[in-house]
Image: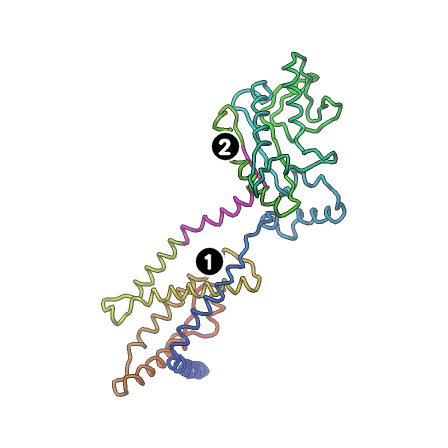
Amino acid sequence: MLRHAVRSGLRASFHRLGHFVANHPVFFASAPVLLSVLLGASFSRYRVEEEVERLLAPKHSLAKIEGNLVDSLFPVNRSKHTLYSDLQTPGRYGRVIVSSRRGSVLEPHHVDLVLKLHSAITHIQVPMLGFNYTFAHLCLLDDSKNCIIDDILRVLEEMRAARASNQTVPPLRYPITRLKDGREAYIGHQLGGVQTAGREGVRSAHALQLTYYLQVASALNEVVAARWELLFGHELERFSTAHPELVLYPFTSSSLQRDFQKTSHVSERPLLFSLAACLSVAVLCSSMRDCVRTKPWLGILALVTVSLATLTSAGIFNLTGGKYNSTYLGIPFIMLVVLLVIKMHFDPGSRRRSVYLPSEFAQKQKDRDSHSEVNHCFHLCSSSSVVRRGKIETWDV
């Protein structure tokens, strides 16, 4: 009894809705398109997340909590700009790991090549607003207003100068060594694959790491530093081609972000293939021998409808500040299944036409009856069913 009452009520309500839609076809055909275009225009506000820590760690992660604690308790802590244990070193920088294919990087020939590479990096020119910026203009300064460079470079320069003057090369200690000016320097993170020989110091090293920190005190410096990082990679490629005896592994502050963003392109081919498959299935499911009566173009129309719905929902997400999730890509395909099911119910009802009524009135009557016959099959639990199991429940009526 209750079932028949609900069924009759749904049929009557959808009958009136179908009558209203049939009387205003222009509005119901143009309003969704206009709404989708207006909401889709909000894509102009779309911005790519540039802070790598927001991409790699949630707000409640221990790395974020520790970083916020350091920022709040030690606001003048400069060491945080050069910590290698950070999730992502703040600011702009270029980093390269130099490894030798044969022998040690501390051999005279390799030392000369490393210093030559350092000279090439510091002479990279970035033309901007009629001025050529180099590393000397962009480098991060220490308390003495000098560019911050790795201490291992000073060690290599002292070794080359000692060999050029036929003097004894001072022993290199690891991980803390003493420079010529008497200052002790920690090089544990700048020299890798180290083999020591007791009191004689370091005997050989397989690789070394060089980092070039840039300052971004203004918006112009940010643009120039980003351009410098790009040229930094090109310069390392040229140097690696010219000197194959060294292996260079470049890394910049934007490398992690660029690699992370590239992962979104992995789904392009599967998504396009799925879209083409859905289009083909939609047309085939809507096609029979009698193409005039079955209207195979309704499958394409269903896909267009899904595209407009996706554009509209994306616009709503952007305007409300929602976060994009890749799982939303599956919603259009679920909706396409819904449309195909509705279409299967709609076909039998749409073919019925009264021959005793005038043409215009008969068309409205047909639309009204078809609308009521289709929609009463779907109850209110269908929406929650889509969310729970991704399928539509129907009544056997």
Residue 298 found in image quarter: bottom left
> Which element type, helix, strand or loop, lies under badge 2?
helix
Which stretch is magenta? 249-271
- Residue ID at (46%, 82%): 2
Quadrant housing the C terminus: bottom left
In the rendered image, the vertical position of residue 189 relative to residue 78, given as above or below = above
Name, please, the residue furthest toward the left.
289
Name, please, the residue furthest toward the front.
130
Q: Residues within 10 Å of mark 1 (few under 14, many from 20)?
A: few
Q: Which residue is mark 2?
A: 237
Q: Percent from the top left, x then y, of residue 238? A: 49, 30
Observer-nearest of 359 and 274: 359
In the rendered image, the vertical position of residue 358 relative to residue 74, given as above or below = below
Observer-nearest of 136 and 342: 136
- Residue ID at (68%, 40%): 81
In the rendered image, the vertical position of residue 337 relative to residue 269, given as above or below = below
Q: Percent from the top left, x then y, of residue 235? A: 52, 33
Q: Which residue is mark 1?
A: 329
Reading the chain from its start, which is encountered first: label 1 or label 2? 2
Given the image, on which type of amino acid does mark 1 rest? Answer: Leu
- Residue ID at (35%, 60%): 279
Q: Percent from the top left, x then y, of residue 63? A: 66, 46
| Mark 1–mark 2 CB contact (< 8 Å) | no
In the rendered image, the vertical position of residue 303 relative to residue 63, given as above or below = below
